[in-house]
Image (cartoon, rainbow, N blue to C red):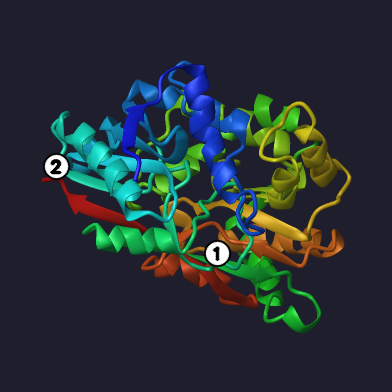
Amino acid sequence: MNELTIREATGRCDMRKFVRFNWELYKDCPYAVPDLLEDTLDTLNPKKNPAFAFCEAAFFIAERDGRMVGRIAAIINHRANKKWDQKRVRFGWIDFIDDITVSQALLRRAEQWGKERGMDTIVGPMGLTDLDLEGMLTDGYDQLGTMNTIYNYPYYPEHMKQLGYEKEVGWVERKVYIPKGEHAANSQKYLRVAEMVSKRYGFRIKKFKSKSEIRKGGYIQKVLDVVNKSYAGLYGYSELDEAQMQQYADTYLPFLDKRWLSVVENAEGEVIGMGVCITSLSRAIQKAKAKLFPFGWFHLAKAIYLNRHPKILDMLLVGVLPEYQQQGANSLFFANLIPEGIKDGYEWAESHPQLEDNYASQNQWKFLDCEIHKRRAAFKKAID
């Protein structure tokens, strides 16, 4: 067998190769949504991603006989390590063929890189920040992926176990049926609760006339401030700063239909909760072969602007400030989204990954017809 080599990706050509390996590995899989080339290159570029102000990273490529057979990113988020008093190196953007020698060599290189920088534990898959892709798929391989989650083959978690990694935390994702016909369930409960809390507390949904109003009104920062506060205690979370908020706005705002941004305000006009959805772009990204240019943008434009979507909504973020979580604030964005989903003919929504032991968050779906259809996990190992 030819020698396996692991080398660091350097320069634009290598980074393009690093990103495109995901497409090459999964191009024949009907469920995988590959990394969008242009966005991922920007995410991994220290000159374009403000997360590198508090993160350092290296990107490694595995090759055998001149052929790329795997990749991995080694990441240290110093802000998260300081917050949680840890010495952790993260691994992310990991892909490999079904060969244990490849996955072992990649992970060992990431471990070594972290050890050289004083880290004592490796964990992943995780990104530079907690709004990047994280969590290895452990169940639901026959379900369509999303642009904001990881898809991987079933042999990935098997390799992790063989290499001495143990599960540290898990997430679940739900298929939430749009409440109509046989799937109506008890969805009217959200409408009744929303009406009640509106009268009692003065909560209301903020409506937007344009994306420009969202930007100029400072609502990107207001919404992500809610994310910072409502997600603060969740696994590995580190606070987003203003530069990161702007980056996420630039990434997702072009894909957003303003109707799918549900901002909840209190009687004083302060943002206390939000729900953000986008039309599923999974099939469009597959058709575009995970590239916007030269012609990939056309497939995304059809899904976004011509309503040629697979009748699926992707829920990106849902959050309510802790002090309002017991006052029914989340009922308002469900009451706002449900009629829109019915009107546009959507069939179901894909929930964002939720920690499997975060029962308070999972309880918000209790009046809807839904099912857990995917599970994912982060794995950890002490560095020798």
The amino acid type of the residue labelled 2 equals Asp
Where is residue 369? Give x, y as percent.
65, 78
> In the rendered image, is residue 178 in sight?
yes
Residue at (71% x, 66% y) in the render: 348
**Residue 288, quarter of the rendered image:** top right
Q: Is residue 202 left or right of residue 158?
A: right
- Residue under circle 1? 328
| Farthest-out residue, right | 306
Front position in the image: 164 or 255: 164
Q: Is residue 277 left or right of residue 163?
A: right
Q: Name the secondary structure under disc 1.
A: loop
Front position in the image: 322 or 4: 4
Q: Name the secondary structure under disc 2.
A: loop
Residue at (63% x, 48% y) in the render: 27
Q: Is residue 2 left or right of residue 26?
A: left
Front position in the image: 187 or 371: 371
> In the rendered image, is residue 221 in sight?
no
Relative height, residue 32 to residue 301 (above, below): below
Front position in the image: 275 or 143: 143
Sort mark 2 into few (<14), some (14-19) or many (20+) by Cα contacts within 10 Å. some
First in residue order: circle 1 vs circle 2: 2
**Residue 169, quarter of the rendered image:** bottom left
Where is residue 353? Give x, y as percent.
49, 58
**Residue 200, quarter of the rendered image:** bottom right
- Residue under circle 2? 120
Total marks shown come to 2
Q: Is residue 372 left or right of residue 121?
A: right
The amino acid type of the residue labelled 1 equals Gly
